[in-house]
Amino acid sequence: MLPASLAQFAQFLDPNQGPEPTGDWSEEPEKFVALVLIGFAIGILGHIFKVKTMVATGILMIFLATVGLPVWLQLTR
């Protein structure tokens, strides 16, 4: 059973087995990294000053930078 699972996993990791990448992603990652870092800073300050709104805003910014905006940009192109 384990060898069969490893064979399936090896096929999954083989880049020749997957879909052909189109290369149409043109967004620079610096914007997303900056949004994550600012979100972490706001969240940390919210924890230091015990302001739940700041913590929630920081979490929302991190979520938007890592999931929300990339998915939205991919779906709208």
Image (tube, grey):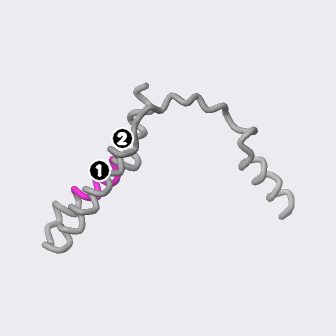
User: Magenta stretch?
Assistant: 57-64
Of the 4 image quadrants, the one containing the N terminus is: bottom right
Residue 34 rendering spot, x and y as whole percentages: 30, 51
Residue type at mark 2 is: Leu
Q: Is residue 65 above or below residue 23?
A: below
Secondary structure mostly seen in magenta is helix
Of the 4 image quadrants, the one containing the C terminus is: top left
Please tell me which residue is depicted at 39% across the width and 39% down the height of the picture.
28
- Residue underneath mark 1: 35
Q: Relative to residue 34, is residue 19 drawn left or right?
A: right
Please tell me which residue is depicted at 25% across the width and 58% down the height of the picture.
58
For mark 2, does the 10 Å Cα neighbourhood hold few (<14), some (14 to 19), or many (20 or more) residues? some
Quarter-wise, where is residue 7 in the image?
bottom right
For mark 1, does the 10 Å Cα neighbourhood hold few (<14), some (14 to 19), or many (20 or more) residues? some
Badge count:
2
Residue 24 rendering spot, x and y as whole percentages: 51, 28
